[in-house]
Image (tube, rainbow, N blue to C red):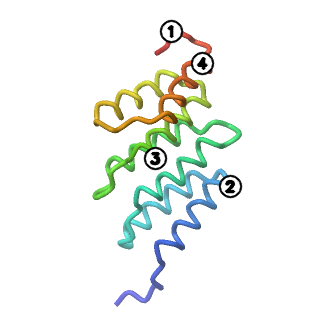
Amino acid sequence: KDSRPIISYNIYQTVLVALAKAHQFNHMNSLLVRMRRRGVRPNVYTYNSLLKICASHKIPRWKEALSLLSQCQREPGVDPDLITYTTAMRACARGKQAAKAMELFRAAKDLGMKLDVYFYTTAMDACAKDTRRNSW
């Protein structure tokens, strides 16, 4: 019998957010794997919280944001929502990655999501911040 203590979703969530805030993205990803192995599934709120940290980081963490979005899309029973796409797009905008942001824009649109003013504003911001104007 497994004698390891049962760790709740809330504890995992708290530690994941702390790792992301401390720029420990490798440890964060390792914990996500360990979390799944122990039968505790991250949900859309888990991913949105981590994406928000990537998007608001001093050094834009757009690569980490895209990786998290990809994990979210593959996670059984988890459907990325408009907040997920908007926040990942914001990380790309801050990283001056308009082409990546526009890929997310098209993906959300193709999924039939009801796009809101924040989504469109984030897309425009991505285009405005990219110095390679024709990259998208």
The amino acid marked with disc number 1 is Asn
Residue 50 x %, y %: 54, 52
Q: Is residue 135 above or below residue 111?
A: above
Q: Is residue 92 above or below residue 7?
A: above
- The mark closer to the camera, 2 or 1, is 1
Q: Residues within 10 Å of mark 3 (few under 14, many from 20)?
A: many
Q: Which residue is mark 2?
A: 22
Verify CB contact (< 8 Å) between mark 4 and mark 1: no
Quadrant placement of the N terminus:
bottom left
Sequence order check, earlier mark of 4 and 2? 2
Identify the mark at residue 6; answer none if there is no mark. none
Q: Which residue is mark 1?
A: 134
Sequence order check, earlier mark of 4 and 1? 4
Residue at the farthest top position: 134
The answer to which of 61 and 78 lies nearer the viewer is 78
The answer to which of 70 and 90 lies nearer the viewer is 90
Q: Residues within 10 Å of mark 4 (few under 14, many from 20)?
A: some
Identify the mark at residue 68; answer none if there is no mark. 3
As measured in the structure, the alpha-carbon distance from the residue carrying label 2 to the one carrying label 1 is 35 Å
Sequence order check, earlier mark of 1 and 3? 3
Mark 3 falls on what kind of element? helix
The amino acid marked with disc number 4 is Ala
Residue occupying the point 41% across, 55% down: 44
Verify CB contact (< 8 Å) between mark 4 and mark 2: no
Verify CB contact (< 8 Å) between mark 3 and mark 4: no
As measured in the structure, the alpha-carbon distance from the residue carrying label 4 to the one carrying label 1 is 11 Å
Verify CB contact (< 8 Å) between mark 2 and mark 3: no
As measured in the structure, the alpha-carbon distance from the residue carrying label 3 to the one carrying label 4 is 24 Å
The amino acid marked with disc number 2 is Ala
Residue 13 x %, y %: 53, 66
Sequence order check, earlier mark of 2 and 3? 2
